[in-house]
Amino acid sequence: MRAPLIALGVVISLVVSAVASSQEPGAPNMAFNIHPVAGNVYVLERGDGFGNVAVLVGSDGLVLVDAQGEPQHPLLLAALKRLSDKPVRYVIDTHCHGDHSWGNAAFQRDGATVIAHSNVRKRLATESYCGPHPGTGLPTVTFVSQLTLYVDDEEIRITKLPAGHTDGDAMVYFKKANVVETGDAFVSVRLPGADPSKDGTMLGIIQELQRIIQAVPEDAKIIPGHGTQASIGDVRRSLQVLEGMRDAIQRPLLAGKSLDEIRAMNVLSPWKDTLGEPCVPHVPCDHQDAEAYLRSFFTALTAARAPANGDSNQKSHP
């Protein structure tokens, strides 16, 4: 989730660039670290903002969750060789951002099948700022709500999440190992954020975290999109913080306060230690600050209150 060293190609006005995740992170020669999680599931991580790669080692090949960036592909292959000499059979994209999908084409050239939600394919087919060049690395197997993949005795459930970080978010649950990869719907290094350019919203992020908590056992091991291994308790804590921020903004909004008035009330101060330092305009920032969350929640809450079907006599409250 570090801010990119190469521009994303789009400036997101409501959320800092870190939300969209890096397209081509720095330190390209940094080796991957391998950590066993449970059963035959491992996580490959590099730290310094790089996304995680979950790996299931099967008897006839590997299943990866997320593909990293193409510049890191040789290093990723070297790390995988330390786990198994079998080829990569499947790559599952958790969403379209380039630090998770840019390596798709390289794995496809080696014979892997890429799986993702249908919205991921649509965006990768046309949008250069998702990461890969448009039309490259497209998933060849897509799903709408859920897809199940069986590898040896492991059942892999790939489930669409509500539109939160992006509109193509999916979580991947390895049932036997009891491990879930969340993509950027949950990150352990900071609070997750929404990318409105991909139809993500902060209210959707809250729904995603709720869905993850409801869908997997309490003792499941969590591989976040970024950061170290976590637990359902960590997901729940992020959810509680975001729900608190939402409510703190919603109360004055329902009372008719404007964005500027709510900003002056400093309603997010109880979470100042959870957020990073304020980001400076036009300077890369590796996190969302209070201003970004304020604007994102205000926009989402305002949209949720908008009259349905353009009928000004109808009122819809979140």
Image: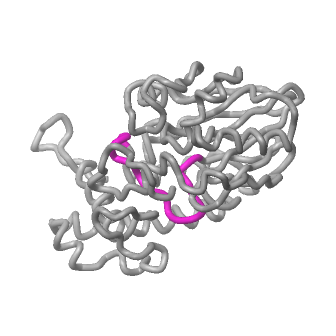
Which quarter of the figure has residue 119?
A: top left
Kindly identify the residue that appears in the image at 48 percent across and 74 percent down: 274
Kindly identify the residue that appears in the image at 20 percent across and 47 percent down: 306
State the residue lying farthest toward the front.
Answer: 29
Could you say which is closer to the camera, residue 179 or residue 112?
112
**Residue 25 vertical position relative to residue 72 in the rendered view, above or below:** below
The boundaries of the magenta stretch are: 183-199
Q: Position of residue 265 (x, y in %)?
A: 24, 79
What color scheme is it? Answer: one colour
Q: Position of residue 79 (x, y in %)?
A: 78, 45
Could you say which is closer to the camera, residue 135 or residue 121?
135
**Residue 302 vertical position relative to residue 98 in the rendered view, above or below:** below
Check if residue 9 falls in the magenta segment. Answer: no
Is residue 143 visible in the rendered image? The answer is no
Q: Position of residue 192 (x, y in %)?
A: 49, 58
Secondary structure mostly taken by the magenta-highlighted segment of the chain: loop
Kindly identify the residue that appears in the image at 85 percent across and 32 percent down: 58
Q: Position of residue 296 (x, y in %)?
A: 32, 57
State the residue lying farthest toward the left.
Answer: 312
Kindly identify the residue that appears in the image at 59 percent across and 20 percent down: 141
Which quarter of the figure has residue 123?
A: top left
Check if residue 186 falls in the magenta segment. Answer: yes
Is residue 271 visible in the rendered image? The answer is yes
Q: Tell me how many marks there are.
A: 0
268 left or right, relative to 182 = left
Could you say which is closer to the camera, residue 59 or residue 6?
6
289 left or right, relative to 303 = right
**Residue 272 vertical position relative to residue 142 in the rendered view, above or below:** below
Which quarter of the figure has residue 90?
A: top right
